[in-house]
Amino acid sequence: MIDITGLTKDFGGAPVLNGIDLQIAEGERVVVIGPSGTGKSTLLRCLNFLDVPQEGVIRIGDVTVDAAKARKADILALRRRTAMVFQNYALFANKTAKENIMEALVTVQKRPKAEAEERALAVLAETGLADKADSFPAALSGGQQQRVGIGRAMALGAELMLFDEPTSALDPEWVGEVLDLMRAVAERKQTMLIVTHEMQFAREIADRVIFMDGGKIVESGAPSEIFGAPKDARLQKFLKRVEG
Amino acid sequence: MRALDLDYMLGLVPVILGYVPLTLFMAVAGMVFALILASLLAVERVVKVPVLDWFVIVFISFFRGTPLLVQLFLFYFGLPQVLSFLTNISGVTAAIMGLTLHFAAYMAESIRAAIMGVDRSQWEAAQSIGMTQGQMMWRIILPQAARIAAPTLVNYFIDMIKGTSLAFTLGVTEMMGAAQKEAAGSFLYFEAYLVVAMIYWVIVEALSQVQKRLETYLNKAFVR
């Protein structure tokens, strides 16, 4: 169970998140949509403190952190209950595909190396990249890199997976394989919070869609409601624009 | 004008070569200590520990802002007058200390720049998986910074090898000191110093070959 209340963030006085309240049930897949610059990515990045929120309480499983008085240990605890997939993949450039997945298992989770390696190879097989285990990121296509990125996040067994526009930086030819892998992750009842511009994908995969504008959650509901019967004028306008 | 005394030079080569191990010892020891110290200084400059940061800034400023020769004299002739436990400091020890501190100050700046040159995404990915700052630095950031800093650091190492010749001024008989003594007997100064120059040149050239291999090794993750 994830419970976010009153999350507030501003960048040098410019408000980006204006008091976000959001509950996510275990196994729920929530997709965040909205115009650029409305704080969607910032919302995700505040949940693992890559961006530091000014106020608000974040609860993920048994960890509760009050942003106003978060300490180092709190932040590490939150990060260890989440896993993030980045827009630009952000694979460790000095490590092979396999080592990218093993890194957190060995260094952070302190698992034996052999066990971590076994897990990494299993995850690579699931992502369809078993033959790329020893390749460095620079030798992989964008689609392959992002699949490793998702694999790295999957391997953590985190309570919440965060996807920050995982297909936005990809050449169109690689988008399909990445979305397919995300579908496979979703089928395992993994709790997911996804920021994406892929509306068709959102419609198909989401249990709930959230529309954000101006640092607020404007409308929230099942995909059928959000895409079929949008209430707020801003959402209607946004959908008209992105769906043509 | 007179002809070079080639026989004298050839005879001198093995004599001077006998001091190469001492030169390399001072340079390698200085480099190892300087690298460790410079990495610590650089990480501090990036992380900025309150108060400590101020000391690091002053340290780097002083050791970059004063000549190596002056620093060596300070360590060897000056400090023992103030700190009695240094009374018996050897010239070699003082030289290694001076080289370490002097070059650490320079190298800290290039390592700091290299750390800042590691892509933002690498830091964020390391943070997102819950690494501590130390784990992130040691396992992700410094290995990548090493690749960026390598060419500059090898240059400093070359400079340090040549810098060991200043140990001569502390009474250490290294390559330069040995040549000086030989020449004082034969009066063939040109020949003696030419032999020293050639030997330094060959050492540095050999190192350039090592540098190529090192860079290939550090680049292996980045080849498409």
Image: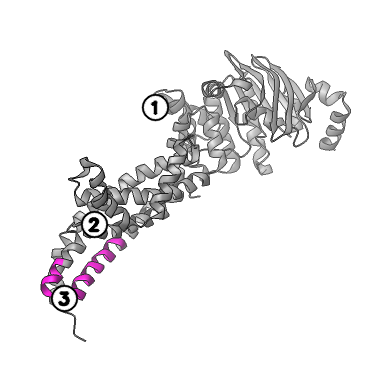
Residue type at mark 2 is Ala
Q: Circle 3 sits on which residue? A: B188
Mark 3 Cα-neighbour bin, 10 Å: few <14, some 14–19, many ≥20:
some
Classify residue A226 as left or right of residue B197: right
Q: Quadrant of residue B59?
A: top left
Q: Position of residue A198 (x, y in %)?
A: 73, 34
Kind of element beneath mark 2: helix
Say above or below: B164 vs B12. above
Q: Is residue B23 magenta?
A: no
User: Which of the two marks, 1 or 3, is nearer to us in this view?
Assistant: 3
Within 10 Å of disc 2 (Cα), the crowding (few <14, some 14-19, many 20+) is: many
- How far from the left and from the top, in percent, is residue A150? 58, 31
Name the side, left or right, on which A187 lies relative to A102. right
Dot 2 and dot 3 residues touching (CB under 8 Å): no
Residue at point 32%, 56% (across, down): B70
The residue tagged 2 is B167
